[in-house]
Amino acid sequence: MTVAVGTAVAADDGRSRFAAADRRLRIVIGVLCLIGIGIGTYLTYVHYAGIKVVCLSSGGCETVQSSVYSKLDGVPVAVLGLGGYIGILITLFIRGDLGRAAGFGLALVGFLFSMYLTYREVFTIKAICQWCVGSAVLMTLLAILTAIRVLRVEPATVAPKSVPRAERRRIERRQAARR
């Protein structure tokens, strides 16, 4: 007969709370990625179909989309964003520290690139694209949420401590005497 100390119950409770919080973070990150994939898919489609971007502002989207900054080495920036969102989504299915670190790495690169492009929109192109701003906001949120996932420390697994035989016998004798 093994008598276990109550620390294992506390550790299990900590692990289950961590797992629930991580699950909620993964769901929110997944939803944000799906929205980003929608934006990236739309902008990629518009680029290759050669049609006008639906824009609420007065031509800002077309100005940005036709600028020299809309491509990186011939690849449309929308395709890069689409790849980034898909990559972050895939990392949600990789267990452990590797998945969390990869997701954060991709989100951080996406965030920094979005900040660079936003700088170019405001100070160089002098036009604002609502789709680009939406994507930048999403990437900022993803960088924050993936950073939280990386920085949260999973509770260590605590093995139940077994009580030495002599102590176990004393406990059993006391319990028998109470009966």
Image: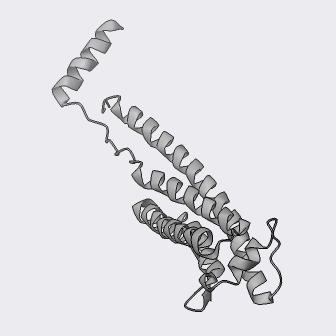
Q: Is residue 64 left or right of residue 8?
A: right
Q: Name the residue located 46 percent from the left edge and 36 percent from the top edge.
A: 13
Which quadrant of the rendered structure holds the C terminus? Answer: top left
Please say if 136 is above or below 5: below
Tally of numbered tags: 0
Can the viewer see residue 56?
yes
Q: Is residue 9 left or right of residue 103?
A: left
Q: Report which quarter residue 65 is drawn in.
A: bottom right
Q: Nearer the viewer, residue 151 or 95?
A: 151
Q: Name the residue located 65 percent from the left edge and 59 percent from the top edge.
A: 32
Name the outermost residue toward the left.
166
Q: Position of residue 20 (x, y in %)?
A: 55, 44
Q: Nearer the viewer, residue 119 or 51?
A: 119
Please say if 105 is above or below 172: below
Q: Report which quarter residue 61 is drawn in.
A: bottom right
Q: Position of residue 72 (x, y in %)?
A: 56, 86
Name the outermost residue toward the bottom.
74
Q: Nearer the viewer, residue 112 or 91?
A: 112
Q: Report which quarter residue 75 is drawn in.
A: bottom right
Name the outermost residue toward the top.
178
Q: Position of residue 116 (x, y in %)?
A: 52, 71
Can the viewer see residue 94?
no
Q: Is residue 128 left or right of residue 29?
A: right
Q: Position of residue 62 (x, y in %)?
A: 76, 78
The colour scheme applied to this rendered structure is one colour
Q: Name the residue located 38 percent from the left edge and 44 percent from the top edge.
A: 155
Which quadrant of the rendered structure holds the N terminus? Answer: top left
Please say if 83 is above or below 160: below
